[in-house]
Image (cartoon, rainbow, N blue to C red):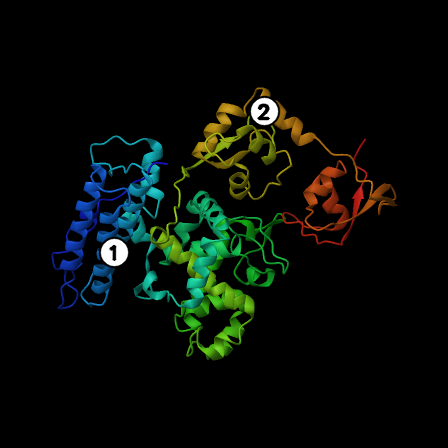
Amino acid sequence: MRHWILPLALILAGCTTPVPRGDAPVAAGDDVVAALSAFEAALETWHRGEANAGGDGLTRTRLALDEAVTACLQVETCDAMTALRAQSTANARMAHALLGEREVDPPGPDDALTTTDRHAHVTSPSGDVPELARSAAMFNGKRLDEVIRLNGAVKAGIEEWLTWMRPNLLDAYENYQYLRHRMWPVYEQAGLPEALLFGILAKESGGKVHAVSRAGAAGLLQFMPATARGYGLGRASGFDDRFDPTLVTRANVAFLNDRFRELNNDLELALGAYNGGEGRMRRLSGNGSRGFWDAPVYNAVPPETRDYVPMVLAAAWLFLHPQDYGLELPSFDARPAAITLERAASINELAVCMGQFGNARGWFRTLRNLNPKYEADTRIDIGTRLDVPEAAARAYEARCRSGLLAQTAAELNAARPPASARSTWVASAAGGSGRMHVVRKGETLNAIARRFGCGVPAVAAANGLRPPSYVIRAGQKLRVPSCRA
């Protein structure tokens, strides 16, 4: 992985020159500048091979920089964001040095960048200062990282994301990067922080467009049916708008703005309302006169909401400050593109033939997210336009238009396992032969249909299930029509 580290001297450039804020100057502080210079000298010594193997010099100067930044933050005229950014970057540079990784200087105006390098520069909030500033958009007149209170609940949430839920967080981040062009412009236009959007998405769905909860909430941002209808999310030609990334983001913005107006612009109360219901939050908070963490509110909300709010805030905080916690958020070539199918194929087929070309983890989830109207195993007509990242478009051109791999993918998609011996024959509603299947824990309608040699629409129609989610539950009896010849 190529690391793009902004030099610390550049981060602090201009910080020793007073910048007006009322009548007071803003500066990173002489002590921070001095500590930074000492760290840079120790780092240079390390790279020349003159330091001992333990990195004592680096450690001492890094600790001194921590102390200087902490002292700076106690002074009203300190440029906190700049000092903290220098501290975070010093952490990253020290880690690369101790791990033996080579740092890469930032490109100058005359340097030629590869497509991947340029994209990494644009999309990585942990490495690109302008992008970080944009992600830390103002909320209610303050930066988001000034609004979020790092209390015990939020810190516990950060720990969860960084331990057993770290894979979930990284999955959500990858999914979001490929969906970003559909969602972030809505937040940007509304003046809401991108980190907040990511925090909600990470907690609600992990960036899976077709996520459906047991309670019936659906989509990337998990709207209940009644709330969805109230914010303009309906069903067009049978498609549930909750699965459309742009439409659901607009509904999310509208919902939050309504709650901000009702709840005294309190972010935590608005998030509590998003999870636990707006009526309950208005009542408990006295229309925003009490905060979410106040005992009469916090102790009265459901346990799910007490968990939800700090977990969203924790994910948003990590989105803004990954390097402070040793979190590496990778870059992705997520530039949007499109393909036009030259042969009929399902999402499953495309995922198989594209393989890991351009994405080490494969393209299935991204294809599903960007084309939510199509079932994974349903063949899509020739000539259909599908939205894909540019890298996936290259994978399609290279591997899916024709050839052995494309043929193999089609054969795999058509394959059906033998019918389950546990299923019993019953008369179908139409009077023909069929089967009754009892849904087992973890089964999906797609898997059941494939087992019996049926398409998902046929089984769904026989049981009155609506696309595209086709919600089923363990123990439910499904009528499976005879689909095999």
Between tags 2 and 1, which lies in front? 1
Image coords of residue 404 (percent x, y): 59, 20
In the displayed structure, would residue 46 be above or below residue 144? above
> What residue is disc 2 on?
406
Of the pair 164 and 258, the residue shown nearer to us:
164
The crowd level at tag 2 (other Cα within 10 Å; few <14, some 14-19, many 20+) is: many
The quadrant in which the C terminus is found is top right
The picture quadrant where one finds residue 303 is bottom right
Say if residue 11 shows up in the picture. yes
Image coords of residue 144 (percent x, y): 34, 61
Dot 2 or dot 1, earlier in sequence: 1
What residue is rendered at 43% in x and 78% in y?
A: 290
The picture quadrant where one finds residue 253 is bottom left
Of the pair 118 and 92, the residue shown nearer to us:
92
The quadrant in which the N terminus is found is top left
In the displayed structure, would residue 123 be above or below residue 416? below
Of the pair 34 and 232, the residue shown nearer to us:
34
Q: Give the distance between the C-alpha atoms of the residues marked 2 and 1, in whole angstroms.
A: 56 Å
What residue is rendered at 60% in x and 35% in y?
A: 348
The crowd level at tag 1 (other Cα within 10 Å; few <14, some 14-19, many 20+) is: few
Q: Going by the image, does 445 lie left or right of 358?
A: right
Q: Going by the image, does 335 lie left or right of 46?
A: right
What residue is rendered at 66% in x and 29% in y?
A: 412
Q: Amino acid at mark 1?
A: Leu
Q: Amino acid at mark 2?
A: Ala
Image coords of residue 252 (percent x, y): 48, 59
> What residue is disc 1 on?
63
Disc 1 is placed on an element classified as helix
In the displayed structure, would residue 382 be above or below residue 119? above
